[in-house]
Image (cartoon, rainbow, N blue to C red):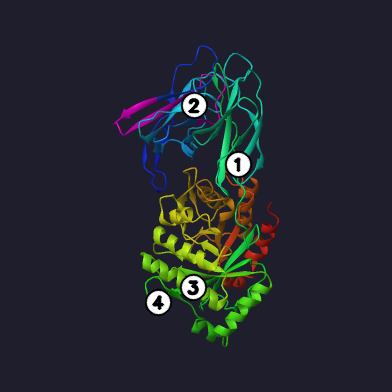
Amino acid sequence: MFLAPRRWLRLGVLTLLALPGAVVGTATAAHAAAPTATFAKTSDWGTGWEGKYTITNNDTAPIATWAVAFDLPAGTTVGTFWDSLLTASGNHYVFRNREYNGNVQPGQSVSFGFIASGSGTPANCTLNGAACGGGGGGGGGGGAPAAPGALRVTGTTGSSIALAWTAPAGTVTSYRVYEGGTVRATVTGTSATIGGLAACSSHAYAVTALNASGESARSAEVAAITTGCPASPLPRHFLTGYWHDFANAATELRLSAVPADYGLVAVAFATATGTPGAVTFSVDPGLASSLGGYTDAQFRADVQTLHARGTKVIISVGGEAGTVSVNSAASATNFANSVFSLMQSYGFDGVDIDLENGINPTFMGQALRSLRAQAGANLIITMAPQTIDMQSTGGGYFQLALNIRDILTVVHTQYYNSGTMLGCDQGVYAQGSVNFMTALACIQLENGLRPDQVALGLPAGPGAAGGGVVAPSLVVSALNCLARGTSCGSFVPPHTYPTIRGAMTWSINWDVTNGNNFARTVKPALNALP
């Protein structure tokens, strides 16, 4: 018999350790029965424990795939896990099979395990939508009812989301509306309104049905955003490109020569001064020489040329070689004041944070809020973190994005120069694929950022990056996968995100060098998104 390797994965950390695991044969059941998932604590040290679920196929037909879902009480969370893939929403956890242990023949068992922090134990367990004990979920008999169907959003306000669903067959006495592991409402009818929500906030709900015999499996989730999001100076979907304020192997361009496909142009880069946190900008002498002369006055005029055709222009701070550091209240003030000064001088519409050598979320957050107070509600704030920066909400960049999400325009993570990374399902994905873009974007989409605050950042073609260059058609596939649930790879996101903001490319200059293939392929696809 093939013994499958056990794989340990820790949330947010790229770690793979091969250890022995097994598919275990059991005696054939005397009669057909529903599959079961049995929980056991294999170790407990007070502040945490190790748990194990064993899925046993008591039926006469093979199980092709399995998913075990359960809730943990507040204060108890899952950390390390093995022999499964994990998706979590609040305190609701769904463990799915790996590629090597999904098929469970009649009379066989497979298991997976995990480490939990806290003292709580699993509740509301389901296996492939039915009760883990092998009962319920049938609806027509004396057991718990089947899951409600057709859960949908029927309305939103600035503080509420209205839901409705279809009643399952059988006796139902009430319904529970869940957000993650928390019950948000208990009702007797097939609709509910969840109130007390913050304006412009994202939520995902599922519904269960109850009767005297128990609770059903959860319905499919539905996501919604409350109204009240600030009006954006940018379109629903748009393409961002970086413009070089330097000369290299790519085509040099005056700012006014930027193709009209771009809705947002990030000028790369503002640089540090001798004052902590302060930045400055001027046209690079090497670029000016390559163009046969290009002055600051001509650049300012070109900013207005782009404005006249509806394109926004922002100043990007940092870059691979950037040395800007905002790590104190004083440097935060200096950063805000100096960026605002550049906005007034050159006509920039906002700022892009592209600090690739570390970021302090507390003081950079202070700086951006101070800048917003000076520039007003139309200030554009974008961020361009590397993939490693957005693997976990504990990272500085991710913390910054969450801390300022009420004023943040968009995060266009750089899905290149990365190697392999974890997706939101804890699967390991290699750069240069649809799976890589969608599974990593899912981390942000499922952990606090609105879809309109998430975009995909990719190189414009050969020469633009050392790794992760993809055909623009794959970027289109990734956008369609996230927005519509179509053209996905093997990874399929848990939800669709019709308001996914768009795409970014490094850079406009490299795209012009490569025949404008990125912009000419991706921009029409953005125009066609929902």
- Residue 494: x and y, percent? 57, 41
Query: N-terminal of the two: label 3 or label 1?
Result: 1
Q: Amino acid at mark 4?
A: Thr
- Say if residue 359 shows up in the picture: no
The spot of residue 202 in percent (x, y) is 56, 46
| C-alpha distance separating marks 3 and 1 | 42 Å
Is the Cβ of the residue at disc 2 closer than 8 Å to that at disc 4? Answer: no
The residue that disc 1 covers is 160
The CA span between labels 4 and 1 is 47 Å
Q: Is residue 123 visible?
A: yes
Tell which residue pokes out farthest to the top in this image: 30
Q: Amino acid at mark 1?
A: Ser
Residue range corresponding to the magenta coloring: 40-68
Query: Left or right: 394 with respect to 298?
Result: left
Residue occupied by mark 2:
124
Give the farthest residue toward the left. 45
Q: Look at mark 4 in the image and give the residue it sits on.
A: 273
Numbered disc 2: secondary structure = strand
Q: CA distance from mark 1 to mark 2?
A: 26 Å
Crowding around mark 2 (Cα neighbors within 10 Å: few <14, some 14 to 19, many 20+) is some
Relative to 431, residue 5 above or below: above
Which amino acid, by three-letter code, is at mark 2?
Asn
**Marks 3/2: CA–CA distance:** 52 Å
Q: CA distance from mark 3 to mark 4?
A: 13 Å
Find out whether the residues at labels 3 and 1 contact each other: C-beta distance under 8 Å. no
Hey, what amino acid is under mark 3?
A: Phe
Give me the residue at 62% from left, 72% from top. Answer: 512
Q: Secondary structure at mark 1?
A: loop
Q: Residue beneath label 3, please?
A: 269
What kind of element bears circle 4? loop
Q: CA distance from mark 2 to mark 4?
A: 58 Å
